[in-house]
Structures are given as C-alpha cells and as structure tokens.
Amino acid sequence: MLKASPVTVRGTIGRRARTREHLLESEVEKLISAARKNRYGVRDSTLILILFTHGLRVSEALQATWKQFDLEQGVFHVHRLKGSNSGDHPLRGREIRALRQLKRKGPTSRDFVFCSQQRGRLGPRAVRLMIDRLAKRAGLGELNIHPHCFRHSCGYHMAEQGRDLRLIQIYLGHRNVQHTTRYVQLSPRQFDGLFKD
C-alpha cells in the first residue's frame, strides 16, 4: 500500500489524505452502480465507464465529441491532451450500448458527449463533486476518490492483467515510459513466480 500523503482537492471537498491513487475494478463497478441512481444516471455511469476503460483525463472525456465515437465499427478515436499521444481504442459492447442509450436519453448535444442539463459541456468541478457524492453513496468515501483516479486505475488494471509495459504506455498515450512504470511497480503481479509454493 502506498504511503498516504495530504493532497488538496479544489471545491468543497477540502484537504484530505489518500491511501492510494487507483481503484480496483470492483470499486469502479460500485461507483458505476451508484451513478445509475443519479438523476442523469445514464450520463454519469457512462462517463465513469469511459474514464476508466480508456484511461482518460477528465478534460479529455469532457471534450470528447460524438465524431470521435464510431459506434458501428466499435472504435473510439481518443484525442489525448497534455502532449500525450492520441490513438484509436476498441469499444466493447457494454460501452457501445451505454453510449447509444446516452444519445437517446441525454443530456447530450449534437457535438459533445457529456453535457449538463442545459446541454452545455459538463465542467470538471461538476464531475469532481459528482464523484465525491457517488463515492460516499457507494461506501468508498474513505478512499477520497478524484476524477484522475480512473486514469491511474486503468493503468493499474492493465498491469494486474499482466499486460506488457509497452502496451500500457501506448494505450495511455504516454510519450515517456517512466510515466507508465508506476503501474507495474504498484502491481504485485510483477513478483509472480519468484518463489514456488
């Protein structure tokens, strides 16, 4: 377990310590289930699913347009920010179904996927507050979850699956592999096979 260090989270969340910067897949699923009960449950649960599955920064998700999603071919044209490498990711059936449902039920716009009630682009602060409320509802309040956790969780999940370091680097769009090694270092899978039972 990582050493807890105090971090400042903007908004009403305040200054709190985090014990780790990633979530387990089961914890992400709890958040998705909790999000479905929101007023805009389709939007909120789909946002969390896309953040986690594609290792997006919250800004990348909120700037995502419908043109980036080819629901027929099952491809997401990921546009990375902060100097990261963009690329194409496959969309699973679950994601395609969620995105189609969001397109039908909204709130969404002709351009942006994740929108506010007024059909304007959803803001990062609204997402932070929403995730904080969901974490408490899902019984995960002690983890002090923030939107960037989903990007870390994606990298950690891939390392736990035994994925190659280079594959994780390409998937997350890291230009420098040093940013990727943290996920392998966090995963106990790196020590598999060192000792016999």
Image: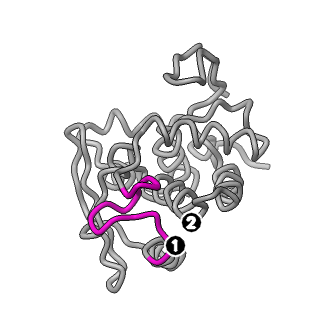
Quadrant into which the N terminus falls: top right
Check the image and report above or below for 148 versus 66. Answer: above
Q: Residue at x 51, y 76 (%)?
A: 101
Mark closer to the observer (1, 2): 2
- For mark 1, what is the residue? 98
Is residue 184 in view from this perspective? no
In screen coordinates, is 31 left or right of 178? right
Residue 27 percent location from the top left of the image: 69, 49
Q: Position of residue 66 (x, y in %)?
A: 30, 68
Q: Is residue 113 magenta?
A: yes
Decide if residue 72 is on the left or right side of residue 130.
left
Q: Amino acid at mark 2?
A: Val
Element carrying mark 2: helix
Which residue is depicted at the point 55% across and 56% down? 44
Q: Nearer the viewer, residue 125 or 6?
A: 125
Residue type at numbered disc 1: Ala
Q: Main secondary structure of the magenta part?
A: loop
Residue at 29 percent across and 69 percent down: it is 110
Q: Are marks 1 and 2 in contact (CB under 8 Å)?
A: yes
Q: Secondary structure at mark 1?
A: helix
| 130 is higher (above) or lower (below) than 115 | above
Picture disc at residue 42: 2
Magenta span: 104-119
